[in-house]
Amino acid sequence: MTLAIQDDRLAQLLMKSDPTLGLDAARIKLERAALVITIGGAQAAGWGQAALLTIAECGVRSFRGGVYLDGEFDELVHVGGWMRVPLKRMLIAAGCRAETPPPHALRVHVGADDSSREARLSCWTDGWVAGVGPSGPKDALRPGNEISGALAGAMLVTAAFRMSVLGDLVAARRTQRLSPLTPQHPNPEGIGLDLLPSAMWLLGLGNLGQAVLWVLGLLPYRDPGAVHLVLQDIDRCGPENQDIQILTRVPWIGQRKARASAEWAEARGFQTTINEVPFGPDTVRDPSSPGLAFVGVDNIETRRHAARLGSGFDLVIDAGLGATPAELFDLRIHAFPGSREPLAAWPEVPPTPSEVTLQPDLQKLVLQGRLDQCGALSIAGQAVGMPSTAVAAATIQIAQALRAIREARICDFVDASLANTARTVTHEVEVARARALLFEEARTGGG
């Protein structure tokens, strides 16, 4: 299905990245981009399956030339609440292809064991550290988990997109490492997934909220039916969401995001409550509702309302993503209560009158009659995004919640870019032990 120009966010991304490219050339470039996935012994590990499934879901949205499978992929799925079917069956259902790939397709590998060295990129985990680079490390690696695995998969798709679509050759040479648990430290002390939060409020079910749901769906809950999710969003799914939101598919178009997300979550065994009322300045969490909130909205006022002390949440972990091509792989996490107030995290910015100007390729489409002036202005003001960046942010949000449970300590600020993880900046704070114990007492154990 060919998206309308106004809905084709990936083509818009390429056009904004290179104003001389034009719509047709951007779409040709996207249609040519393809991946080939291989995997070794990692397909038997939880981290490897989480990485592989994340690569598949993000890859089929970002690589229109196809995501191809090279290998058997015959291990049974054992992550999350999915049916115990062969991996290949789930990957095909996600949109991957089993036929012969085109010769130009970029080969990527899950694991540090690519002895053939045919892959241009590999991803791996070393405990809580996720890595991606032109080759895996030679040293022995600690066992990873589903969260670091999902992050490794997201980092691999990001690097592959930068290489094959954006032409960023640095992505092919640089090894990146990032831990969702302690993002600024390359070798964190590990904690297990035996204590997992069982009551969560997801505010916003777009790119970020769906990514949180995706990662939660990978976790080893012994009893998913004991997990309660409040899913809050007031919007409907649109065709423009298909490329950038990890759960959105064609049948979701026109549905309320909260309801479609609830159906997905319940299929994995979770219990859900749908909330389609805006979160405003007077919204206060009922004591019987989840005290842990994952926030992923693009409205600053809503973010401030959720993070304020009077909202009633025990812990709010907010994620935000970059909105321009230059910020495409950037993410920022804030947690509350923390070292700063919501207004300090998102200060008031005096409104400045600005006139949206059309770049030459959009103006050309208007002159050709392929786009009206109003549609062109709308495109010029739209944000761009990638599902892989959102998944990376979600892994950090969830990992920080686990730290609150186990260590009464979190990163209340994380500023990172998947394009250069070495520049990650964080700030850590203690969490009141009483609050952390509330999560611990309410949790359901992971296997």
Image (cartoon, rainbow, N blue to C red):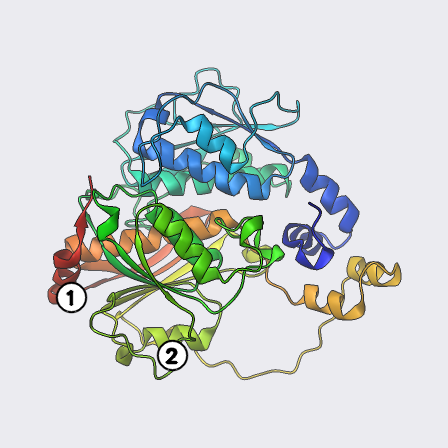
Q: Secondary structure at mark 1?
A: helix
* Residue lying at 68% horizontally and 41% vertically, measured from the top left: 30
Q: How many marks?
A: 2
Q: Which residue type does callout 1 highlight?
A: Arg
Q: First in sequence: mark 1 or mark 2?
A: 2
Label 1 and label 2: CA atoms lie apart by 23 Å
Q: Which residue is mark 1?
A: 435
> Where, quadrant-wise, is the C terminus in this rendering?
top left
**Of marks 1 and 2, the one in the foreground:** 1
Residue 444 in percent (x, y) is at: 18, 50
Of the pair 90 and 190, the residue shown nearer to us: 90
In this view, the residue in front, 253 or 142, is: 253
358 sits to left or right of 104? right
Q: Which residue is mark 2?
A: 343
Q: Is 356 placed above or below 219 here?
A: below
Q: Residue flagged by tag 2: what amino acid is it?
A: Leu
Assess disc 1: are there few (<14), some (14-19) or many (≥20) residues with their C-alpha within 10 Å of its C-alpha.
some
Say if residue 192 shows up in the picture.
Answer: yes
Counting from the top left corner in percent of width and height, residue 17 is at 67, 53
